[in-house]
Image (spheres, rainbow, N blue to C red):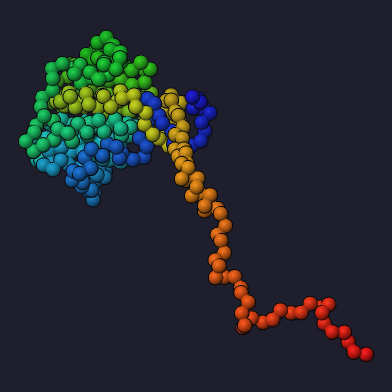
Amino acid sequence: MPSNDDLGTGGDVSVSPRYLAGLPGHADPSFAPVANWPHHRPDVGPCQLIITSPDHRIRIGWFGDDYDTWLISAAQDPVSAPCWSARINQNTPPEIVEGLTRALAAEWDEDSDTFLTRPSVYWSDAVQPLLDAGWDRKPLLRGTVEVVSPDGLAGASIDIVSSGPDAETVTLWAGPPGWGTRAKAIFTARTPKHLIAATAAALADPTPVLRYEAGLHPQLAKLARLAPVEPPRPATPTPLDVQRAAAARRPAAVPACSLRRWTTSTSPPTPAVGSRPGLRR
């Protein structure tokens, strides 16, 4: 595989690991699982789009250019305060957010409350996909457990001490520190751990994602593995294709009706010069 410095095409590339791909200028993958839910576009305020479950218990806010680009929450009913919330910043690939929205879309039902249930008492349930993928669990330090990817460029921080309902206890992160490079998804204490796990599974998913190379943050592009996306090769022509192409190149025959024929109305041919009578003296 060529090095990233050898690409230089500025065209489409696949990015691996996906957690270094950043936001491509749109959030389409994160909205795809809830495409059929009601969409609302506020006239005022920083929120550009709100997608709600049909009963309005789940809310997905899109803030576009703000640092916290997504704000996702769930409540007992449309007018109650959220039971839990997740705020996700502008450096997070939408394919990772899709893990959460897909889980919510699959679980929502008018008679369901599994997306509201109190979380498991075991902190590891929230990050089990990371542990299953071989990510390293660090020793407990000041009430926080860290789980870090083998390359050290992504991980999870779990606060096992704070217990308030609005305490932000789980952070999934990726990329080096910095406003334009560090991705974060932060969950409050009462977020069901299986929903955090669904997001963590998307974080650890080894499937590359597609990006436009020129749109990648330079620092992330240097850390990621980039591979140019080759356009599909044309299919090998079949014998019938070859025959049709040859027929298309062959000159068309002149129709028989276009040939001139001798008729009584046809002017007689001009006599040859040598057959004219000589001049009289």
Q: In terms of image quadrants, where is residue 147?
A: top left
Outermost residue on the right side: it is 281
- Viewed as shown, does residue 229 lie left or right of 280? left
Could you tell me which residue is drawn at 18 percent across and 36 percent down?
105
Q: Is residue 129 visible?
A: yes
Could you tell me which residue is drawn at 8 percent across and 38 percent down?
110
- Viewed as shown, does residue 26 lie left or right of 44? right
Outermost residue on the top side: it is 139
- Viewed as shown, does residue 193 lie left or right of 32? left
Q: Where residue 258 sits in the image (x, y, percent)?
A: 57, 70
Q: Where residue 125 sits in the image (x, y, percent)?
A: 18, 18
Placement of 24 over or under 257, stated as above or below = above
Placement of 265 over or under 136, stated as above or below = below
Q: Where residue 131 sits in the image (x, y, percent)?
A: 26, 15
Placement of 18 over or under 233, stated as above or below = above
Could you tell me which residue is drawn at 93 percent across and 90 percent down?
281
